[in-house]
Image (cartoon, grey):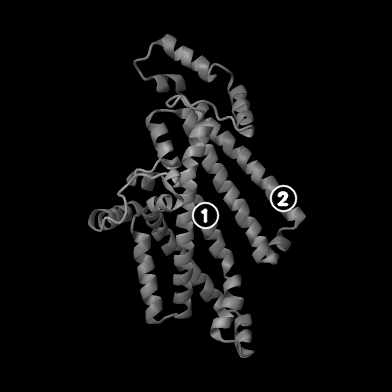
């Protein structure tokens, strides 16, 4: 297990370094004067030059890259040009909303998908299976931002159970904060749950056809005991793969939903930074999202080895 983790950690660090190089090249080395973009086309050459010196754009590219990388290692992301605030403070403030939102959406996704997928697989080719997979197909086809608007119209405008947008803040209480995030979490979870439910059903049906399942049934185990004791664990590898990708997608892909509900999360910060041409914030936020995706994939790899030791053995 130690060698397995060591190799995976090496891959993790190499991937993070590669991601930092790509992000730096895209935002710093490509043609165009970042200071001119930040100041606007009508700025004087003196003002543009002064901003370039302030941002360190007059330094060689390799020096700027190492300064940025060194700052990341000690938690220094620089100062936002638009907000005149340390980028780390902005990011931490927005993550306090985005991370709970992603966790809520992932929890709803997992519960809905596993219940639907297990039920459909255990009722294969019956009415329950057809009905659940029909609903899953509709869920896949519905854009989450359109579903978010429907939730606002029904629960906020008609029933007036929830606010149509905004975030109450954690200072108002945990319950009130989660209530503000419930509709956005549902709108994010529906599409992801529909995808995961179909994959769960397919994985379970594939395992149900294996010889060891017939052996377990021949020994007298009930269908329920066979499903929960033998089939589900062996079917979890592809399910966990998709769950890891979905959670990373939820962390990085909340920009549209956060704008629909007017939530001050990380996605909205990136959207505002792009609008304001605040490249310092964009660069660090994109790197953070990339790091989150990479770390989630690392955790999924470790879970592979925990669930199925054959993965660890084949890797070593």
Q: Which quadrant of the figure has residue 208?
A: bottom right
Q: Is residue 164 left or right of residue 98?
A: left
Residue named by callout 1: 245
SS label for mark 2: helix
Could you say which is closer to the camera, residue 31 or residue 313? 313
Q: Which mark is residue 73?
A: none
Q: Quadrant of the C terminus?
A: bottom right
| The residue positioned farthest toward the right in the image shown | 2
Res. 252 visible in picture: no
Which residue is at a point 60% across and 33% down the rendered structure image?
75
> As displayed, is residue 7 above or below residue 70?
below
Could you say which is closer to the camera, residue 315 or residue 77? 77
| The residue positioned farthest toward the front in the image shown | 172
Q: Where in the figure is residue 115, as x and y percent of width and height?
A: 46, 71
Q: Is residue 57 left or right of residue 6?
A: left
How many angstroms separate mark 1 from mark 2 (CA)?
Answer: 21 Å
Q: Which mark is residue 7?
A: 2
SS label for mark 1: helix
> As displayed, is residue 291 above or below residue 213?
above
């Amino acid at each position: 297990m130690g060698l397995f983790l060591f190799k995976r950690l090496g891959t993790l660090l190499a991937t993070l370094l590669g991601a930092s190089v790509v992000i730096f090249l895209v935002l710093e080395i490509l043609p165009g004067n970042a200071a001119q973009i930040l100041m606007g086309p009508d700025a004087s050459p003196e003002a543009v030059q002064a901003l370039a010196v302030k941002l360190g754009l007059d330094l060689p590219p390799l020096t700027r890259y190492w300064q940025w990388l060194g700052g990341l290692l000690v938690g220094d992301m620089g100062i936002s040009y638009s907000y005149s605030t340390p980028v780390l403070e902005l990011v931490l403030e927005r993550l306090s909303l985005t991370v709970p939102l992603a966790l809520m959406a992932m929890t709803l996704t997992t519960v809905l998908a596993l219940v639907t997928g297990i039920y459909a697989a255990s009722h294969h080719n019956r009415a329950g299976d057809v009905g659940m997979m029909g609903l899953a197909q509709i869920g896949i086809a519905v854009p989450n931002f359109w579903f978010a608007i429907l939730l606002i119209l029904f629960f906020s405008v008609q029933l007036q159970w929830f606010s149509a947008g905004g975030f109450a803040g954690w200072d108002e209480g945990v319950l009130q904060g989660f209530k503000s995030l419930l509709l956005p979490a549902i709108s994010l979870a529906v599409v992801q749950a529909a995808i995961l439910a179909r994959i769960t059903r397919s994985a379970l049906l594939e395992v149900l056809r294996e010889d060891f399942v017939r052996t377990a049934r021949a020994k007298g185990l009930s269908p329920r005991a066979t499903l929960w004791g033998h089939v589900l664990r062996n079917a979890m590898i592809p399910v966990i793969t998709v769950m890891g990708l979905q959670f990373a997608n939820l962390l990085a892909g909340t920009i549209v939903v956060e704008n629909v509900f007017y939530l001050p999360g990380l996605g909205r910060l990136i959207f505002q930074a792009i609008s304001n041409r605040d490249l310092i914030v964009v660069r660090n936020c994109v790197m953070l999202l990339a790091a989150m995706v990479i770390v989630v994939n690392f955790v999924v790899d470790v879970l592979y080895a925990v669930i199925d030791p054959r993965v660890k053995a084949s890797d070593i």
